[in-house]
Every structure is written in structure tokens, then in C-alpha cells.
Amino acid sequence: MAVIHDTTTYDHDGAISNTTGMQAADSLETTTMPDATIFPPKEKYSFLDDYSEGAHPQVLEALIASNATQETGYGNDRYSAAARQHIRDHLGRGDVGIFFVPSGTSANAISIAACLRPHEAVIAASSGHIVTRETGAVEASGHKIINVAPSNGKLTPASIEKALDDNWHYPHMAKPRLVYISNATEVGTVYSKAELTAIKALCEERGLLLFMDGARIGAALTSGVNDMTPGDIVDLTDIFWIGGTKNGALLGEAVVVKHAQLAQDFEFYVKQHGSLLAKGRMMGVQFAELFRGDLYFELARRGNVAAEKLSRSIAGAGYALRADTETNQVFAVLPLGLVKELQRDFSFYVWEKCGADWAVVRLLTTWATDTAQLEKFNQTVLSWGAP
């Protein structure tokens, strides 16, 4: 497995004392880890998702170095406190609440439950993760999701307005109260500052909360088309979360709550949803390491660079892309014969069929994408020939 190499050292109580040797984030030069001692390498290399690998070595080193220290439970430890401060520093806001939860589904379900009263509903793109990939977790808490057709993966003020116009018959219909968006979106596209500003303005005008799913917020903020800072995300949303699982952590997401009144009781919702971990330090250590410098963003940038290489090669071979490659997701339209040939050596999702002979495939890259495997994939596409 290919990784970024580091030479971080630690003192006796787990504090980080020095870090050198980080490779440039836009480089795809890699270091090869030793073969696994328990399981041999898989027969196929995976482009299925961005969480197939474990954690970045620097995060693992931090976990090992902190392992023997005694800490208070449930996120009240020194590492979680440091992580919160590091994240606030990156956001440029010292007044936000930050809560660590173990998964993206828990981040979404808890955040929405904390924001809404029982009769209130969520407006979301029909492609949104809470609609298609979370087994009704939001509905299980009693909240209706109002589906809206996305435009290039995104919601727009016009589409939100239509949802409001279609759900007006109170008290006989659930009342729209929260707008859910993802950045990056489920097709890998990124909201611009102008787009997000327009949505936020409508939300304020119509009394709606704006919630951003940040499973891939690192990829979005390091995208070549991005024009927002982390501070802009705080200013233009009411609540959002920072994904660790898909960007260098073993597990964990950090929910950022802007409003003091909502943050005051947020931890109760985390507990009720079974996500307030006794060993919350495990997430605190990881986020402290990811955000004490720029490691989080360097890792996200590496995934984007790898995706761009895949995308450029596929397009150069004459094949179309379903969506522009703006982050670490590539959606390519390939002939079924080529898809089957690629499946001999690689795992990936066949996203949807296109007629009898073509399909859209989704390819995910990460900070750990193996350059040799990426080049092998590209060579297979090129060898197949132009469509």
C-alpha cells in the first residue's frame, strides 16, 4: 500500500515534538509499506471507496504514542480538547461547538435530529447520502425528507423554492425547516462561494437552517475549482461536519455547530444516538494530529491529484465523463467490454447502465492510492482503444 512517509517523533507522554519528511501534497511519489502479516494483499486493487485503507501512519503514530496515558472519558480528554482548538484555529472561529462522532451516518442523523422539531422536514437532493445510503436513518427519527432533483449534484435556490412551494399546506404537511447539502457532492462536484451564498440568503429569508455534509469536505476545500476557505463554510452554514473517515483517520467525524443554543444540548443527542464513546480520546487523538498542521488538507489534495490523473487519462483515450472531475471521484462512461476487462484486476462500482453496451463507473482515489495501480488502470483503458 502506498502512503506518505513521515518522521514524527514523540516525547514520553505522547506530545508531538518534531515533524519532518512530509512529501509534497501534489506529488504522487509514494512509499511502499511492508506486506501485511495477517492477510495477503487482495487480488484486485480497489477504487471502490475512499476508506479501504486504514489510517495515515502519522495518525497511527499519534495513537500509539498516546496509548498509555490516562484520560477522562466521553471526549473530555486532553487530546479532544487540543483537536477542538486546532480545528477552531483552521476555521478562524473560537466560538463554535465541536463534537466528535464515529461515522457519517451518525453525524447526519444526530445533526438533523438536534436541529428539528418532530413536525419539521429536510429538503435534500434526491442523490443525497441521507436519501440513498443511510437506510432511512433520518426518517427513523421521525423527519420527512423532501427530495429535490439535483443540478450537477447540487441544490439551487430555485430547486429549494420549488420544494417550499410544493409543501405549503400546514398543518397537513410536514414543514420544511432544514436544507441538507453535501460538499463535495455525491458526484464529486464542489459548491462555489457564490452558489453557497445564494442558498444561505434564501435560507435566511425563508427561515431555514442550512446543514452541510462534509464527508469529503477536505477534497472540496483542496479542489482546483474551490474558492472558499474553511471560515467561509462556517459563515455560510448553520451546522456542518468535517469527515475524518474518508481522509486519513481510522474513523471519526467532527460536527461543527455555530449557534450556541444548539451547541449547548448537542451532546445529549450524541449520547441518545449511541455515539458518545467512552474512549472518545480515540477520535480526539486523530483529529488533533490531522489538524495541528495542514496534514488533513495535504492528504485530501493527494486524493484529488490521483483522481485528476485517472480522469485525464480516461478522457484522453476518448471516453466521456458523466461529471467534471473536481475532487477525488471520477465518473466515467465506458463500454461494458472494457468494464469487464478492468474488473479482472480492479474493484469499482458500476454506477448505472447506459443503454445495452455502456455503463457509468465510479472510481474513488485517496491519499494512499498506489501510483503503480493507477498507471496500470490507465494503461488498460488506453490499450482497449478509442470508442
Image: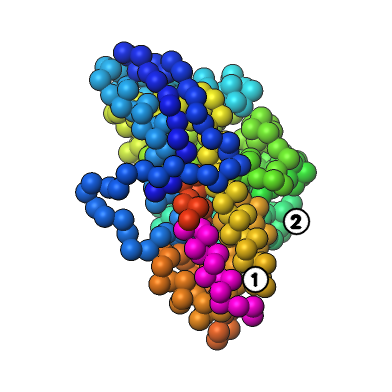
Residue 207 drawn at (x, y percent): 68, 41
Q: Residue furthest bottom?
A: 356
Q: Residue at x 52, y 77 (%)?
A: 338
- Which residue does the numbered mark 1 point to in the structure image? 317
Residue 313 drawn at (x, y percent): 62, 63
User: For residue 72, what is the image quadrant?
Assistant: top left
Residue 386 drawn in magenta? yes
Residue 223 drawn in magenta? no
Depth-wise, is mark 1 or mark 2 nearer the camera?
1
Q: Residues within 10 Å of mark 1 (few under 14, many from 20)?
A: some
Callout 1, which amino acid?
Ala
Callout 2, which amino acid?
Ala
Q: Residue at x 74, y 52 (%)?
A: 157
Label 1 SS: loop
> Looking at the rendered structure, which numbered label has been put on residue 158?
2
Q: Position of 280 compared to 337: left or right?
A: left
State the CA–CA distance, disc 1 to disc 2. 37 Å
Q: Position of 314 compared to 34: left or right?
A: right
Observer-nearest of 61 and 187: 61
Q: Residue at x 28, y 24 (%)?
A: 67
Observer-nearest of 38 and 115: 38
Q: Which residues are magenta?
A: 373-387
Q: How many marks?
A: 2
Residue 137 drawn at (x, y percent): 42, 52
Contact flag, marks 1 and 2 (Cβ < 8 Å): no
Q: Main secondary structure of the magenta part?
A: helix
Observer-nearest of 169 and 135: 135
Is residue 180 shown to the viewer in this render? no
Q: Residue furthest top?
A: 12
Is residue 336 shown to the viewer in this render? yes
